[in-house]
Image: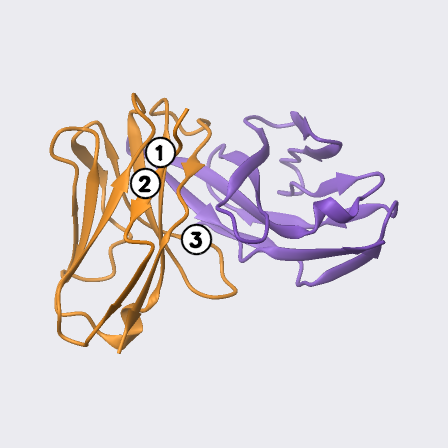
Amino acid sequence: GAGVSQSPRYKVTKRGQDVALRCDPISGHVSLYWYRQALGQGPEFLTYFNYEAQQDKSGLPNDRFSAERPEGSISTLTIQRTEQRDSAMYRCASSLGAGGSDTQYFGPGTRLTVL
Amino acid sequence: GDSVTQMEGPVTLSEEAFLTINCTYTATGYPSLFWYVQYPGEGLQLLLKATKADDKGSNKGFEATYRKETTSFHLEKGSVQVSDSAVYFCALTRSSGGSYIPTFGRGTSLIVHP
């Protein structure tokens, strides 16, 4: 079946613009995670949802970052007033269950470049 | 806070050599432990996991044992292949107030030569 998809795959934007990154999880998966990954580093947790509820957003770096999953399926990560330091790979993952031992299935990522 | 420490890469081996990638962690309670692998040009995918002390995860010839006493989850394979060349990430997930927060290591690149 279809895996996790993300769009766009690449996004180049100018400093100060808002961007919206989309994640389409595997159908029926309860949990959805957002990560940021710098080059040569591991994924850094940003936030996650169970169904439509945002369970934890402790990893969001500041209030320019927000996320939603209004119908418990597709999720959008929005970065307002982008800055050059926001340039990174943004990854989404989903899991069938909501437990800590559930396998996460990762999407291909969106590479964001802020000029 | 939680942390995962992996050995620095790249690790360069000849085909059929023995592989060890060290991973140690810091976390309160009893986290679940994972190894994820990222092949060139692809996303991360689960390689193996262990959810409690002394559990051994295994897949595709790779193994790792959850060692609570040494807070370690080292990845091993007896005979690597060129196709194992990838970046390997050690990770943990810990329960915190009903939420499950994942923490990843920085990854270890493995290069296997024929």
Q: Is residue B44 above or below residue A59?
A: above
- Residue type, numbered disc 1: Ser
Q: Which residue is mark 2?
A: A33
Q: Earlier in the sequence, mark 3 or mark 1?
A: 3
Question: Helix or strand or loop: what does disc 2 sit on?
Answer: strand
Question: Helix or strand or loop: what does disc 1 sit on?
Answer: strand
Question: Quadrant location of the C terminus of chain B?
Answer: bottom right
Residue A9 is situated, as x and y percent measured from the top left of the image, at: 34, 54
The colour applied to the residues of chain B in this rendering is purple
- Residue type, numbered disc 2: Tyr
- Residue type, numbered disc 3: Pro
Q: CA distance from mark 3 to mark 1?
A: 14 Å
Residue B41 is situated, as x and y percent measured from the top left of the image, at: 53, 53
In the image, A41: left or right of B15? left
In the image, A27: left or right of B9? left
Question: Which chain is in orange here?
Answer: A
Residue B33 is situated, as x and y percent measured from the top left of the image, at: 55, 36
Q: Which residue is mark 1?
A: A94
Q: Earlier in the sequence, mark 1 or mark 2?
A: 2
Q: Is there one chain holding both mark 3 and mark 2?
A: yes
Q: Residue placed at 38% from the left, 25% from the top? A: A99
Q: Would you identify the image quadrant in which residue A47 lies?
A: top left
Residue A46 is situated, as x and y percent measured from the top left of the image, at: 30, 51
Q: Residues within 10 Å of mark 2 (few under 14, many from 20)?
A: many
Closest to the observer, B56 or B111: B111
Q: Residues within 10 Å of mark 1 (few under 14, many from 20)?
A: many
CB atoms of marks 1 and 2 within 8 Å? yes
- Residue at mark 3: chain: A
Q: Which mark is residue A43?
A: 3
Q: Is residue B113 above or below residue A73?
A: below
